[in-house]
Amino acid sequence: KLAALGLSREKRDMSLQALALQALAYYSGVASPRAERRVEEACAECALKLGHALGPPWQRCVIELLQGYEDDEFSLSDFSYSPLTALPGAGRANGELLKNLMRNFTCDFEDGGSQPLRTMTWQYQERDPCAGASATEQARSFTYKAGYLPAGDELTELNGLMSEAEAEAACLASPVCRGFTYNSGEGGRPPPDAMRAVYFKSAIGEVGLSDQWHTLKRRGGPGSKPLDCRRGKRAPPPLPSRLRVDVLRDAPPVYLVHDFASDEECEYMVNLTLPRMTPSVVFSGSKGATSTYRSSYSVNMVPDFEDETDVVTRLMRRKFAFAREVAEYDELVENEGQEPVNAVYYKDDGD
């Protein structure tokens, strides 16, 4: 298209360089120090004038200030509001970058955040682990998964040649064992007394598909009591919880749910994930890879929908119930194959 405009090769090269710089700003969020300072000054001036850094009034104030500058240090296109959108035209790349810089300012500015349009109460009934379970299921200390656990999180002191029944006993006796995996050498699950080389794990992630490998995951995690649903032994059914929900936007729907996870659940997830964190990956070609610009750490938490005592399972069911009952995504159903819960750790300043 540039050639069709009759531009010389030199001018075409300059135009392509300009387009490349715009694309770099659009995708990587790079601005000159002077431009960033100018945006910060405009954000601060409007926040001081209005007393807040919220919504279209503040956004419009910042954009009009920047558009009023005589030089083109940070030239901008026009915008539409609710939601803030950079319209097509010259300066759109800067407009997208401006949105990121304004967002960063609002995160650091103490004004109470976006005020809810309204507040409501959501009542949620957590599943009773004993409800609908057979006597055999209630007595199980492990859930079975066809497939293997990848390398890592090894408890080498427990590994050895043993039967499945002996492996269950060894795992239950360990305060840190969360399960084990073994290869039967053939398709199908072998008898419980068959001797196999068993590999024990301190953490259970995603199970890889294989008809020759077998994995048993400890119900509820290490240190938890076996589920006992016998009369006089079972725990009382969980009581309904009432959670406060702030509606921040209707379209698209944005909700703030207070106390969605308890302190105990949060502590469990922190202890589960922090020792297993690895550098976060980005999509590169046909697979994930680490990058220099994404410096956080992350790890997946995989729910086991056969284990209603598992903390991650309970949180996933709660999340899907909220999406169905409040956000009205009626078709959503939690099950095996769903995206796992991803924990992200921003360790250092600037991550």
Image (cartoon, rainbow, N blue to C red):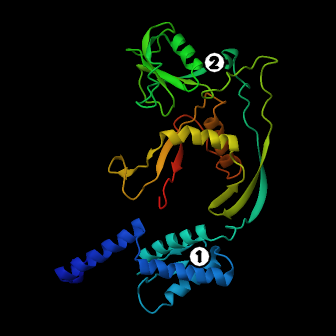
Residue 340 can be seen, yes or no: no
The answer to whether residue 39 is left or right of residue 93 is right
* Pick the front one: 242 or 322: 242
Where residue 72 appears, as percent x and y from the top left, is 41, 87
| Mark linked to residue 81 | 1
Residue 182 visible, this angle: yes
The amino acid marked with disc number 1 is Tyr
User: Where 77 falls versus 219 (above or below)?
Assistant: below
Q: Quick one: 23 or 41, which is closer to the camera? A: 41
Q: Secondary structure at mark 2?
A: loop
Q: Amino acid at mark 2?
A: Arg
Mark 2 to mark 1 CA distance (whole Å): 56 Å
Q: Position of residue 31 (x, y in %)?
A: 41, 74
Q: Residue furthest top?
A: 193
In the rendered view, does 232 fall on the left or right side of 13? Answer: right
Residue 328 is left or right of residue 85, and the answer is: right
Disc ID at residue 140: 2
Foreground tag (2 vs 1): 2
